[in-house]
Amino acid sequence: MEDLRTELAESLDRAEWEWLIPHAMRDALVVVAPQLDILDVGVAIANDNVSAVQHWIGEALITKPSTNQLSDWNSDRARQFNTLIVQPYVLVQELSAA
């Protein structure tokens, strides 16, 4: 599992919203709450850790983007996100403006 975490850490990247729009259009984005480590979520999804993923979904810590989020992001296409691809999903974690 440490190898997987290392592999995912190497693919962790930053992206502007503009680059993520095609993934949003194919309903592949998963929004990760700021209090979670995006790598932990990626490892859990890649390892099919159903209990962890279901817990996060139940707590609304990982979600599909809301209509309001999509609208906000579309109005600021340079908005920055941490991103992690865990096929078929693209995990995104919005970076604070500060």
Image (tube, grey):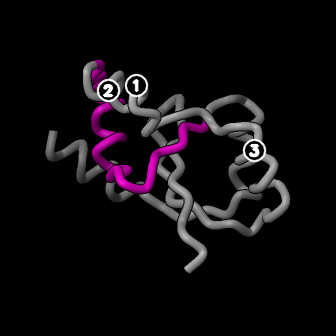
Q: CA distance from mark 2 to mark 1?
A: 5 Å
Is 23 placed left or right of 98 in the picture?
A: right
Using the rendered view, name the quadrant where residue 52 is placed: top left
Name the kind of residue labelled 3 in the image: Asn
Badge 1 crowding class, 10 Å Cα cut-off, few under 14, some 14 to 19, many 20 or more, is few
Badge 3 crowding class, 10 Å Cα cut-off, few under 14, some 14 to 19, many 20 or more, is few
Q: Nearer the viewer, residue 8 or 83?
A: 83
Name the kind of residue labelled 1 in the image: Gly
The residue carrying mark 1 is: 58
Range of residues picked out in magenta:
29-50
The residue carrying mark 3 is: 68
**Seen from this angle, which residue lies furthest bottom?**
98
Q: Nearer the viewer, residue 59 or 84?
A: 59
Q: What mark, if any, has residue 1 been given in the picture?
A: none
Q: Are marks 2 and 1 in contact (CB under 8 Å)?
A: yes
Element under label 3? Answer: helix
What residue do we see at 77% from left, 35% from top? 25
Percent position (x, y) of residue 36? 34, 50
Residue 57 among those drawn in magenta: no
The residue carrying mark 2 is: 55
